[in-house]
Amino acid sequence: IEILDKMPLNNNGKTDRNALLAPRSIYNTLNEIVPPANEAEACLVGIWSKALGQERIGVLDEYTAIGGDSLTAIKIITEIHKNFGVEVSPKYVFQLQTIRKLAEMISSLSSRESSYSGIPKVPECEYYPVSAAQKRQYIMNQIDRGVSYNLLGGMEIDGEIDAARLEDVFRTIIRRHESLRTSFELRDGVPVQIVHSSVDFRVEYIEIEGADPDRLAESFMKPFDLSVPPLLRAGLVKTGDNKHILLFDMHHIISDGESVNIIIKEFVELYGGSDLPELEIQYKDYSDWHNELLRSERIKKQEAYWLDRFSGEIPVLSMPVDFARPSFQSFKGNKLYFTIDEKLTKGIKELAAGTGTTLFMVLLASYNVLLSKYTGQEDIVVGTPVEGRRHDDL
């Protein structure tokens, strides 16, 4: 039982289930905690505890049964690389399931050690190479200069707010993260990133009584000129007495979904008066490191694999739609929100636990089956986003 001061509510006054505390796992209260038998197991217990946010973990506890998922597995393997000097695929965390089996596998791999090294800082320059993801975003921006690749973040704020302090906090975050004062342009036909020492930034102030948050957010997004920093804008909307909505809009070329979470977290901490530790590396350091990685033999093998998988004619999904496809593809669509009942939710979770997989894997498999039912096709290509932070420094 979790005791709350009050139930979190959404705009309609209903319980906001997504804002509720995640229930702590009862797995460890029902099963005996088997302690580590050696140094390797003890190290892995520490790694799992930190990644999963749980103190009591035994070496025979099953990863998916205690709440492990794909993102957590990535964190675990980066820590394993740092502590043991071996590179392990995330799939082994799911296949082996326990710390004891994982420790045994790591011991067998120790003869093929892959030394861990930090990401080095690059020397100061007029401009820097872009990463592969930034290059892709830059090209897409030449094709579509709309808001398809804008990332929107925000929060509702109840109570008094110091507008001047809020703006100062944003300026601190911009000084802290070079990405937020980076612009992009072509040099000799190649896109590059330019990090500016300072940029002009103002928070836009708006008063709209009883504004609809979704419509407000949609109207706030505007196209960015990638050559003019910052590729970030913020707005404070007063919707009533001591009621505000803070919105910020960034281009995907300097940000991703996790970046939005980081900015919200840092905003709350800085506004509350906390100090943040200095950043060891910036995005330009990652770009340089990752571009070097892309030239390595290991990545060339991965490239060859995917070129082979997608050789020949790539299957196109033939959905039986009600209307003819438009001549130009757009990203306009609709969202359908629905709730699945407790019985079905329990069944999905049991299926995931019984197969040593995650909720995401089960739902993705179901989605593929659904597409196959609609189209009669068996060769289906589905893209999913990844976090991309496969190094401990990231």
Image (cartoon, rainbow, N blue to C red):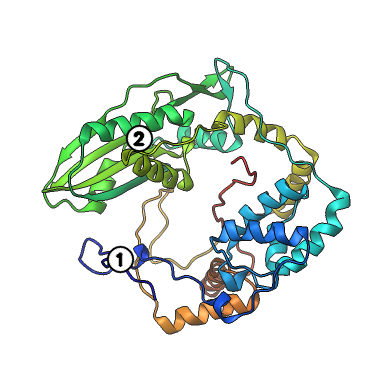
| Tag of residue 16 | 1
| Residue 10 seen anywhere in this rendered image of the structure | yes
Q: Quadrant of residue 103?
A: bottom right
Crowdedness of circle 1 by 10 Å Cα count: few (<14), some, many (20+)?
few
Q: Residue furthest right?
A: 111
| Tag of residue 223 | 2
Q: Are marks 2 and 1 in contact (CB under 8 Å)?
A: no
| Residue 381 seen anywhere in this rendered image of the structure | no
Q: Nearer the viewer, residue 114 or 1?
A: 1
Can you say which quadrant of the picture contains the C terminus?
Answer: top right
The vertical placement of 19 against 164, above or below, is below
Crowdedness of circle 2 by 10 Å Cα count: few (<14), some, many (20+)?
some
Q: x and y percent of residue 358 in the render?
A: 58, 69
Distance in Å between CA atoms under marks 2 and 1 = 32 Å
Residue mark closest to the camera, 2 vs 1: 1
Identity of the residue drawn at 49% across and 22% down:
195
Identity of the residue drawn at 71% across and 60% down:
42
Q: x and y percent of residue 357 in the render?
A: 62, 70
For this view, does 217 lie left or right of residue 313?
left
| Tag of residue 247 | none
For this view, does 205 lie left or right of residue 314?
left
For this view, does 282 lie left or right of residue 222?
right
Local SS, label 1: loop
Q: Quadrant of residue 296?
A: top right
Q: Amino acid at mark 1?
A: Asp
Q: Amino acid at mark 2?
A: Pro
Q: Quadrant of residue 364?
A: bottom right
Q: x and y percent of residue 146 in the render?
A: 37, 38
Local SS, label 2: loop
Identity of the residue drawn at 44% across and 30% down:
176
Q: Nearer the viewer, residue 341 or 159?
A: 159
